[in-house]
Structure formats: C-alpha cells, structure tokens
Image (cartoon, rainbow, N blue to C red):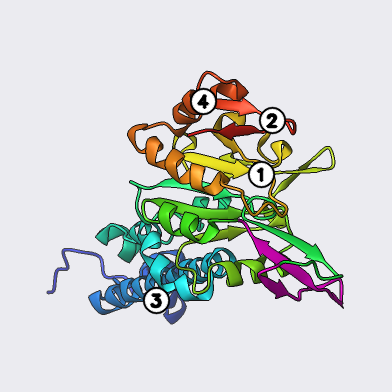
Amino acid sequence: MIILHRPFIVHSPEMVSKIIKKRSPPRSIKRHHRRKTSPTKKNASFSVIASLNKSIKTCRRRIVRLFSKLAHIATTPSATRKRCRLGYKILQQEEEFDEFESNFIIPKALVFDQWQCLLPPLISTAKKTIFLDLDETLVHSSPDPPPKKYDFTVTPSIDGQVMNFYVLKRPGVDFFLEEISKKHEVVVFTAGLKQYASQVLDKLDPGGRFISHRLYRDSCKEVNGKFVKDLSVMGRDLGRVVIVDDNPNAYSLQPENAVPIRPFVEDSEDRELEKLVQFFELCERFEDMRVAVKQCFNGGGTAGGGCVDDYGFVQLKL
C-alpha cells in the first residue's frame, strides 16, 4: 500500500498555462531593465564633446584675428600694420583657457569689450598719446584754382566727383612729427573726410613711420551741428593724452587735455610746431598731461607763459 504525504493534484493543460503566465515577469519590469553603457561608448561621448569644444575654440580664435585685421586696416597705413601686431597680445592672452574648461566647457558667447574703443591697445604702456588735428594745424589745403605756393596735390573722389586740393605744409612739420614720435604715440584725428585726409597723410608721412593711427570724420561726434573729438572713447588714460587743435569746438568735451594752436594758412614764418616740440619735452616730467597743460597755459591766461591772441587761441611762448 502506497501512502502519499502530500496530496497529488492533477491540473488540466489550461490551468498549467495560466500558472506559467503568472510566474513570468511583467513587461514593465523588462522595459526598465537596460544594459550598462560600455566604457567604449563613454569615451566616444567625451571625444565628441572635446572635438566640438575644440572647433568652437578655433572659430573664436579666427574671429579674434579677423577683428584684429579690421582694426589694423581702419587705423594704420599699410606699411605699419605689421609693427602693430604686438599691440594685440592682450586679446591673445584672453584666448588662453583653463585646461579643464577648454576641453569640457562650451563658451556661451563671445564678448569683445576692446572693440568699444576706437583705438587698439597701446604697444607700450609707457608711452603717452598725442592727438593731432590735420587741416590748419599740420597743413593748409585749398581747392582750385591753384595757389601761388603749395607742396603737393591730392585728388580725392568725393560724392563721385574728383577734386584737386593743393596742400601747403606748416613750417617744421616734418621735424615735429619725427621728434614727438620718438617718445609718444602719435594719432592724427581730423574732422576731414577719409577720402581726402588719407591721401594727405600718405604724402605727409610716407610709409607710416611717425603716425601710429588715423581717425577721420566718422570717428567724431556731432554735437549741435559741430564735429567734436571725444577722447574718452579712445581706450587711453585721459591723464596720459593731449590733443592739439586749432578749433576749440573739437576738444570741448575735454578742454583740460587741449593745447590750442594758431590756425595755419600761409605764414612762412610760423614757429608754432617748433614751440610744441619744446612743450612736449617739458611734459616728460609730468605724469599727468593735464597738469602740464594747466601749468604751461594756465587755462588761457598768461601766468604760465601763454597769451591769448586776437583769435582767442592760446599761444605758447618759450
């Protein structure tokens, strides 16, 4: 006789299939079960990110170079553009990122604060800057008919019309530019049109040996119908700049930085530029150029050796 300790139950085929279905895991569990990402795929993701950042960094560097070239073309003659490349070391330093950031962080935007200034950075921060007017300060120009005396001619095209200008250099202008450029940054800032002024400067300073930068009418501000030269947007310390101009309206925003000069027309005995050479030699002992201007001219008075002539311009007497 066979005794069974447990009851033996015989199930039908339908019942067996139901039991098997109950024991199988639900689909929701299967969906959430994923394989771990292999190290090879992780490395591939990092390499893609690194490659993308490298491409963006290269693009940024090329944009910086492009802006640098544009600034050179706008402010310097062709012969001196190569000499000014050192002035962009500040921009090049900004391209140096931290090793981690350069490989794993994508910059959100490119910011060029330097381009808010009209001039590129100084090549030598030890130099002071002299802004010079052109017409009636360095030269005198007259259109047709030709005057009795002139040094050279220029033929700019203005509004589609070619015009003749006969230019007379102020006495001592060649010596003046050569002397002040030895220790100062020289910038010609004129309210004249670029078509005309650029040709005059090419004749006055061939090869760009003495004049570092050129600014024209489009760099002036128009205030009450008059062209004003704002020194605050040049990217220079106002304590280390001075402007020489025959028109008081031109420096009305920074009169403390201005050295007035008698307008030049045809006076062959004019010695104003010779006096200015001596003035800038005296300025070497002043850290702030505004102090030098105030002491030498005394705001248009006579205490500093200056006097006001019939035109209302201060004349330095040395």
Q: Nearest to the eye among marks 3 and 1: give it.
A: 1
The kind of residue on which mark 2 rests is Asp
Residue ID for mark 4:
305
- Location of residue 213 in the rendering, given as x and y in whole percent from the top left corner: 53, 60
Q: What stretch is highlighted in magenta?
A: 150-170
- Asked if residue 215 is positioned above or below residue 43 in the image, the reply reads above
Camera-side residue: 268 or 185? 268
Give the image quarter of residue 292: top left
Q: What residue type is labelled 4?
A: Gly
Is residue 166 found left or right of 202 in the rendered image? right
Query: How many neighbours does mark 2 have within 10 angstroms: few (below 14), some (14-19), or many (20 or more)?
Result: few
Give me the C-alpha separation between circle 1 and circle 2: 24 Å
Which residue lies under the disc numbered 3?
16
Tell me, yes or no, whether the two marked residues, 2 and 4, touch with CB atoms within 8 Å: no
Q: Which residue is drawn at 49% across and 74% down?
A: 207
Query: Mark 3 or mark 2, which is nearer the start of the sequence?
Result: 3
Quadrant placement of the N terminus: bottom left
Residue occupied by mark 1: 229
Instruction: Between label 2 and label 3, give the one nearer the viewer.
Output: 2
Q: Magenta stretch: residue 112 in it?
A: no
Element type at mark 4 = loop
- Mark 4 and mark 1: span between their CA atoms? 27 Å
Q: Which of marks 1 and 2 is nearer the N terminus?
A: 1
Mark 2 highlights which residue? 309
- Determine crowd level at label 4: few under 14, some 14-19, many 20+ residues with C-alpha closer than 10 A: some
Mark 3–mark 4 CB contact (< 8 Å): no
**Could you tell me how far apart the alpha carbons at marks 2 and 4 are, in whole angstroms?**
13 Å
